[in-house]
Every structure is written in structure tokens, then in C-alpha cells.
Amino acid sequence: MTATRATPGSTYRIQVQPGFTFADTAEAVPYLAELGVTHLHLSPVLEAVPGSRHGYDVVDHTRVRAELGGEDGLRELARTARGHGLGLVLDIVPNHMAVPAPEHLNAPLWEVLRDGPSSAHASWFDVDWDALGGKVLLPVLGDPLPDVLAAGALGVVRDKAAGGRVLRYYDHRFPLRAGTEELPLPELLERQFYRLAYWRTARTELNYRRFFTISDLIAVRVEHPEVFAATHATVLRLLREGVVDGLRIDHPDGLADPAAYLRRLAAASGGRWTVVEKILQRDEVLPADWDCAGSTGYDALDRVDGLFTDPGGVAELADFYRKFTGAEDDRGGRWEPTVRRAADRVAGHDLAAEVDRLTRAASRALGGTPGGQALGRDGGLGQETLAPDGGLGQEALAQALRALLVRVPVYRPYVVPGVPASAHDTAMLTAAADAARAGCPPELGPAIDAVRDLALGRAPGPEAAGRGAAADGTAGQRAAGEGTAEAAADFAVRFAQVASALHAKSVEDTAFYRYTPLLSLCEVGRDPGRPATAPQEFHAYCARIARERPATGTVLSTHDTKRSADVRLRLAVLSEMPGAWREWLAERRPSPAAPDPHTAYTVFQTALGLGFCHPDRLIPAALKAVREAGLRTSWTEQDEAYEKAVAEFTDRGPCGAQVYDVGELAGRLEPYARANILAAALLHLTMPGVPDVYQGTEFPVFTLVDPDNRGPLTEAEPGMVRFDLPGALRAALDGTPPRDLEHTKLRLTAVALRLRRDHPQWYGPQASYQPLAARGPAAEHCVAYVRGGGALTAVTRLSRRLEEAGGWRDTDLPLPPGRWTDRLAGASHEGTVPVSTLFATSPVALLTRDG
């Protein structure tokens, strides 16, 4: 077998699923090896909820998923891959497991539900046992419990798969506490270590940590060594035995201590190449103490996309959007107010249970009652700001918490209890607290300061520890001090985890759907408030990556992007043609009319991104958008009449009578979209870092948010099967001039990937990065750099603006010494070359030094 390298040259993401198994992936290996990738990157492969198309809902860490082919199938895939020189990278999920139906599929959770806090697996899950008197809330009922009982939907049955007598509720199965099987149903329910509840109670009463607001994903406490060992044993064994070569870590921000987790993982894995799914803001860097190669690359996506976005055009689009939609500033009209209002809503509503738990931890840490008091449904307590003993009341703490949480500008701080907070986290949380004080009544100031200090891991003062001391002031005071310290540590950890969930839900899952002047900006890792990347900013970013994290991941499309890169790059052209979009949209009068201008604006632009409307794809995306926005309907409180109007408008407007209007405008964008698509692809494949090519994106791919973008590799787009991948690759590389964008992008991808594979001295972790500056009137439209002294990338940016300005004119690009051959166009260049010559047949060039 051909050996694989420790650091991949590139990875190729494949969504393995019941409809595309390990065996199907193995059949694609020869094609992928010819394409030039060095490693396959597989979505999660451990046992998941039956039928899952993504695998992030793990139910058993000890087994490779049977629906994909089991461990034998994975090993056979690895053998096939290694026979073609390819390695495997696995996506793993340390933060959570599924709460499946039937529940016995998750054996550790089943045991906890049966045996309660004394279960051997109780330490696995982040359950606040005190909140419900030693019970776990299970919000799985379709109606309130009395109605469910009256309907006879609950009952005890014998289930062989579950191991005996169980409590049944439709597809659900719940274990029975020993000795309760014969009790009358009401008493039986009361005696269990869980409380079945109406699904709507999850928002306010849930007492286990979950993934964001998804109650059927329960958090796992991998900070405990025994939990880490049990949940990682299979993956670590596959690494040791050479089946797997590297790892992608899902959502480390959900963990109690990501840095400690990564240290433990690096030690256990022997330092295998590992990247983490960390969403970084524009001015944020991966923590230096994270023992990994880097992130999965959303920060690279932001910089690349930004190069093809005209900030002046974005401002024009935003002005038109506000006039067209009439959106209030904080309901989609302007970015920052929209984010703040969304965060306020999420903190006080969607994450009310999480804020409740934090409030009780803060109260205990500051000397309040151990159990605390649960928040009401409105998120408040109706108490006075000051507690009777002169301390801070829980209402004040809850308000202060929400005020601080919504002002955390990044996903989370990384405070470790007992360790001084970093200067970065201290400055960030101090600034957030200052802003919170400025926006709140003065009397809330002490509570804001208190929760800031707790979030920074600062122990409460002795006055807090002394509250509740025994009459002799000794043992009771010591116990109180120990209790407050434990609560303070718990608060610091939970605050960071809740901040992460709040940021994701308020920005990615709400504000991105409310503020929509240019949809290409509303993407994971991007900031609509900072839409553009200047060439010098891009070069500075690349130089830093090459210096600090040269083996980090880079991406343009993933299973989580809300629109594929090619959709975004087509829409980015609107920033260069804001007038064309304004005039086109102003003329659209669909029948039936849109239910509101915001929907009209968003749906028409989404259709434009696709290029040609497919109602079976656009309607689900439109409905998802209005539910996520939560302005007129939502996932939990659906307005059926409104959603019907959205679907009818989408079907009979952009997908009906005006489908050709959409296609006509897309055609006008096409020359500039083509330049963007090719340029972004080439930058991604040649910039510092390890590029991850999402399945199929070696071709032009126009997909929307999941599940639209999660089909099998053989689907070009949902419902469109791509045949004969090897034949398409042979045709792209046969030396004939490219026929179309599909042919051109495939050829570009293959040439670049093969160069990366065959010349690690140009692109590997030790390779240098040297920016090249064009000279002349159109210099800002050319981005160029040299990798490793031997490979040169040059691309065109903002090609529409370039055309309007008169083209390249006298702009030239001084090349490094030597003769350089364009591996895409075949031409050779030396010395200083006119940029118009360099880009005579293509908007991009990939040159290598001869000799």
C-alpha cells in the first residue's frame, strides 16, 4: 500500500449516509485519487439514529454504523483508499449524543433514565439533578400529560428489543425503575427518575444541557476522563490500527474546557492531524493553547468571499433593501440592532432554561439558597433586586446575565476555573459588562459586575461564602465557602457554553434570516457588518496562517453552509451591480403577491442564486427562512396561513410565471459569476492551509441550506444525478479547450489538487507565502501570490467593476525571476507581464516555475 502523509495535502468531504455507504464511497476512490485529493473526509461514522442522513445524532460510541457497512465496511474502504494512496479523516462528535426514539438505542442514557443519579453513567450527561428533585425532564409528549393520559397514549408493554417491560408512548420506549412495574400508571410515572412532559416545556424547564436548542441532542461531559475514554475508544483504536489518519472535531465550543480536551485527544491519538469546527470572528484567532492543526476553515471562507464583495455596492443594496422592505432597524433593517434584538429574544425565550440554570448557579456562588428558585415563563421572578439578606436577588442576576450574554461579541470566553482568565477574555468580558451597564438601569450595576466576575472565574468574596454560616461560624462557614466555590466553577463553565449557544442561535439561525440585503453575506463565519476583504487584508491573513497554523483547514462549502460557494459567488456580483438588482426587483409584481416585502426580497434573491427556480427546493428553503427569522412564524409557533402564502408566492412567482425573469437576470450576472467562481476555487486550493473540497464542488454546485446540500456524492444537485465522474475528469484533462464552466472548474480543481499532492514543498506546512503586487490603474483587481517559491496564483476580483473602469489597461504583474508556465492555459511568461496577457483566456492563472 502507498503510505499517506501525516498532514493531508487536501481533503475531500463525503456525506456517508444510508443512501451512500462505505461501499459506494469505495467505488469513487479511483476517481478521487485521479482528481488529486490525498485524504477522504467522512461525516460521522459511529452508530447514529436509524435513517440519519448526517450522523451527528450518535447513539453508540462503541460501534461503527451498521447502515453504512459497519466496521468491516469502513476497513474495506480504508484498504481501497490506501491502495490508491489516500488516507481517511473522520468527523467525530464529542459534545452530544441523541435522545432517540426508542430511547434504548442510547444504552448509557437508558441506564441513567432507569437508575437516576446513582447510575454508573450519570457522569456522562450534564444534568442538573437538583432542579427537578432528582429527575430528568423528557419533553417528548405531543400534548400536556393529563391529555396524554386521558387519550390512553401511555402504557406499560413488553418490548424484547428494550429488554423487558417498558413504558410506551408511540415510538418512544422508557425504562422502568426496579420495583415499579406493577404500580398504577399515575404512581408509576411519579416513581421514575424522569418526568415526561409536553414538548413546549423544554424552553423553560429542561434540566439537561443540549446542543443549542435541540432537545433530542443531550450534552456529554467528556471533561471526565472515564467519559472521554469510553466515548473515544473506538475512534482511537481505528487510529492506532491505521484505519484512520486524522480527525475533524465537531463543535468544541460546547465542551467545558476545549483546550484540555484537545490536549487529552492529542496525547491519546499520538498527535494526529486534527482540525476543529471553530467559528472565528474577523479579529479573533484560534486560542494558542489549543493542541490541534487549526480550525475547519470558516475564517478562510470569510476572507475569500470578502475579496469578491464590493463594500460600496453592499451599502447601496442595504439602502434599497430598507426602502423596499420597510424593515425596522432591529427587525432586519440594520445589522447590529437586528443581532441585538435576536440575542435578547434567544436569551429570554429559546434559552430560558439555560439562563435559569446559570442564575441559580450564580445565586449559590454568591451565597444564595442552594436550590435556588426556577424562573417563571417570562424569564423573571418577580422578586426585588436585592434579596432579603442584602445580597443580589435572582431577578437581578437573571437580568444581568441576559444583559452580559447578549453583548459577548464572540462565541465564548475560555475561562478555566482556578486559572486566571486570559488578557483577551478579561478585556472582552469587561467591555461587554461596561456596555451592559450603559444599557441597563443603574441599580443593575452590582449584579452585572457580579456575573462578570463569575464569568471570569473570579471567586466570590468572603462575604458571599460567609452567608448561611452555622451559629458557631466555623464548620457551616467552611461548607458554605466550599459550596460557593463549586457553584462559581460551575457558573464559569456553563456561562461559556450558554454564550456559545446564544451566539449561534441569535446570529446564524435568526439574524442571518432577518437581515438579507445580500444573502451571500449571511453565511457561517461571515459578518454582514464587515462584508469585504481588501487584497492587503487577504495577504495579511494568509501570511499569519502560514506562520502560525500552516496545517489548518480551509473551506468554501460545507454541509453546514447556508448556500454553496457558487451560489454565494453569483450573488456577490449584485454588490457590483446594485442598480440592476434594484431595477429588476422593483419591476416584479408576482401573482399571488408576496405576503410581505421581506419575503419577496429574500425569495427572489435566493432564486437568483440558484439561477433557475426549482420549487421542490426553493419552497422548503423559503419556509425554513421565515421560520428561522421568527418574525411572522417559527418552528414552534407556526402560522399556517402565513406559511401557505409564502409557499404559494414562491411556487407561482419566482418558480412560476417569473421563472424566466430569474433566469434572464442570472444570465446577466453569469460572466462575472464565472470569474468569481473560478477565482475563489483557485484561491482556496492554493492558499495556506489544507483545503477541504466539499463533495461535488469540483464542479459548479448551486445548493441551498440543509438538507438541500446533504445529498449523496452522485447527485450534482438534489434530484440531478451526475453520471460517469471518471469520464468527466478524463475529458477535462484531455488538453482540449474548456467547453463550459463545468469542464473549466473540474480541470482547475484537478490541476491544483495534483500540484498540491505532487509538490508539498510548494504547498505543505513548511511552504512560504509571498504576496505579489500588480502595478497600474487596475492593480486592486488582481490578487497574486507565490507559494514555496515555485507556484504562482493570480486571480481577477470584482470583474464587473473592472469592466466598468475600462479593463486592465496598463496594469502589469512583475513575476519572480525565471520562466513561468501557466498550468491551466499553457502559456509561458517571464519578467513583467501585462495582466491583460496573463488573463487573456481566463480570469485566473496558475503558474509554476520551469526547471
Image: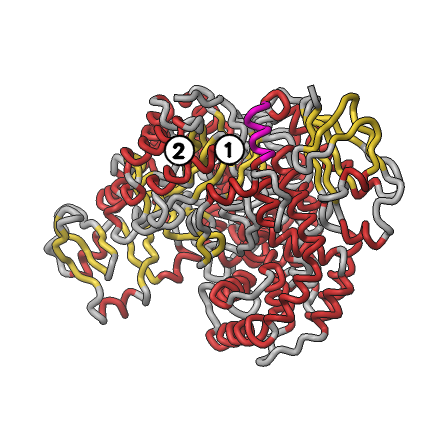
Quick one: label 2, few (<14), some, or many (20+) residues within 10 Å? many
Query: What residue would you read off at disc 1?
Result: 37
Residue under the point 58% across and 22% down: 760
Amino acid type, callout 1: Val
Residue beneath label 2, please? 222
Q: Residue furthest left?
A: 182
Q: State the image quarter where residue 60 is shown.
A: top left
Give yes or no for residue 612 being in the magenta stretch.
no
Rendered location of residue 777, percent (x, y): 89, 43
Quadrant assignment for the C terminus: top right
Choose between 607 and 1: the one closer to the eye.
Answer: 1
Q: Is residue 228 visible?
A: yes
Query: Which segment did they paint magenta?
Result: 751-759
For disc 1, the neighbor class at 10 Å (few under 14, some 14 to 19, many from 20) is many
Residue 45, horizontal then vertical, whole percent? 36, 39
Vertical relation: 406 (above or below) 271: below
* SS under mark 1: loop
Let me know if residue 758 is in the magenta part.
yes
Q: Secondary structure at mark 2?
A: loop
Query: Distance between the Cα atoms at labels 2 and 1?
Result: 33 Å
Tell me which amino acid carries mark 2: Val
